[in-house]
Amino acid sequence: SVLADKEMDVVIWTRNESQRDEINQLHHNDRFLPGVTLSPNLTATTDMQEAMNGAEAVVIVAPSAAVREVARQLRPYWTEDMLVVHATKGFEIESLKRISTVISEELGCDEGRIVVLSGPSHAEEVVKRCPTTVVVAALDESQAIRAQDLFMNPYFRVYTNRDMVGVEVAGALKNIIALGAGMSDGLGFGDNAKAALLTRGLAEITRIGAEMGANPLTFAGLAGVGDLVVTATSRHSRNWRAGYMLGEGKKLDTVLSSMGMVVEGIRTTKVAHTISRKLNVQMPITQQLYQVLFEDLDPRTAVEALMGRDKKTEMELMSIETWETWHK
Ligand SMILES: NC(=O)c1ccc[n+]([C@@H]2O[C@H](COP(=O)([O-])OP(=O)(O)OC[C@H]3O[C@@H](n4cnc5c(N)ncnc54)[C@H](O)[C@@H]3O)[C@@H](O)[C@H]2O)c1
Ligand SMILES: O=P(O)(O)OC[C@H](O)CO
């Protein structure tokens, strides 16, 4: 919709024939965006070759579980001059790889060419042209600037960032904390508890992100704190909603079948749990959430475990040397 509003011809590729017909004939996509009339510049097809024919840019927004398969289908039609942007928030669960790595492997191109678009951007609000800010990042900065120029419009403001790893990792990990925030609300805990989860959650995703090669300051930006706030507080958030139901005592299977949409934070909790063990980095909130999701731990017991941890200092996030340098 953002691109179609700039008078570009946008072709959506879908596997679903009825969704294709609904978009082409009625300019609606009622299951995902009820009550919205889409631009006539948006058309849909189930034929990948048709979707890619003459394209200058391709935007991949499949769920993380489907990205490799979708990128593989794109490969025969992708050409070196095409801009490739992805907006998927997660990792490949089997390999623990970032999404840009998966896409570049399937397209057979340099990872530097892949751009990630992330930040606080619920589709339900973007399609209504509510002011939204996002960030694009790529190892090759010229590709990020291409994406910035492509997407920027009066209600969609795009920043660039050179920290590709940080933007991808922050966008994926915030979903874990949003699940936790939903769970806290579902348990009936108040605003203090949610603020604590967001703050200490940001501390632990920054800590692991830095170990994975991210710039810690990226977590203070749109892909980090920006998206964390929107995902942990918005009524549109699937991750928050899933967490809320878990907090109310519903089982994971029941929650997932009632959602009918991807809840990336669940797979990402598994990935982050594995990575934190490999890198020997403490992620206490992720650890408790992992046990609630996959080991049937009662959410209340998880909160008690978090509150009862050994006493700590907040200063652990920043090395004393860095702090002393700033302090001078
Ligand atoms: N919804 C948002 O506001 C939003 C915003 C930014 C980023 N994202 C990210 O975008 C990604 C997708 O989220 P979404 O909101 O579109 O999810 P969704 O569940 O609403 O829709 C996913 C779509 O992908 C299709 N799909 C699933 N497997 C597929 C496959 N193998 N091949 C082709 N199509 C397949 C589904 O049929 C469905 O139409 C996620 O990583 C999410 O975090 C979503
Ligand atoms: O609805 P969610 O929880 O998948 O969040 C969607 C986006 O990541 C918000 O920026």
Image: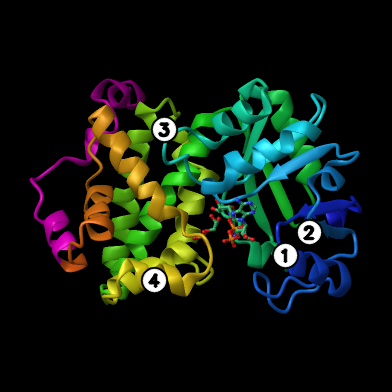
Circles 2, 4 touching at the beta carbon (< 8 Å): no
Which label lies toward us, 4 or 3?
A: 4
The image position of residue 160, as x and y in percent, is: 65, 35
Is residue 93 toward the left or the right of residue 48 in the image? left
Q: Which residue is mark 2?
A: 1
- State which tag comes first along the sequence, 4 or 3: 3
3D distance between C-alphas at marks 3 and 1: 31 Å
Q: Which amino acid, by three-letter code, is at mark 3?
A: Pro
- Say whether disc 3 or disc 2 marks the residue closer to the N-terminus: 2
Which residue in the structure is indicated by mark 4? Answer: 255
Q: Residue at x 75, y 74 (%)?
A: 36
Amino acid bearing label 4: Val
**Proximity of marks 3 and 2: CB atoms separated by less than 8 Å:** no
- At label 1, which amino acid type do we have? Val
Which residue appears at 33% of the width and 46% of the height? 270
Q: Main secondary structure of the magenta part?
A: helix
- Which badge, 2 or 4, is on the more N-terminal residue? 2
What secondary structure is marked by label 2? loop
Can residue 312 be found in the magenta stretch?
yes
* Disc nearer the start of the sequence (1/4): 1
Residue 216 is labelled as 3
**Residues shaded magenta:** 301-328
Q: CA distance from mark 1 to mark 2?
A: 6 Å
* Viewport quadrant of the C terminus: top left
For the N terminus, the quadrant is bottom right
Classify mark 2: residues with Cα within 10 Å, few (<14), some (14-19) or many (20+).
some
* Proximity of marks 1 and 2: CB atoms separated by less than 8 Å: yes
Nearer to us: label 2 or label 4: 4
* Drawn side of residue 111 relative to residue 144, left or right: left
Determine if residue 191 is in view.
no
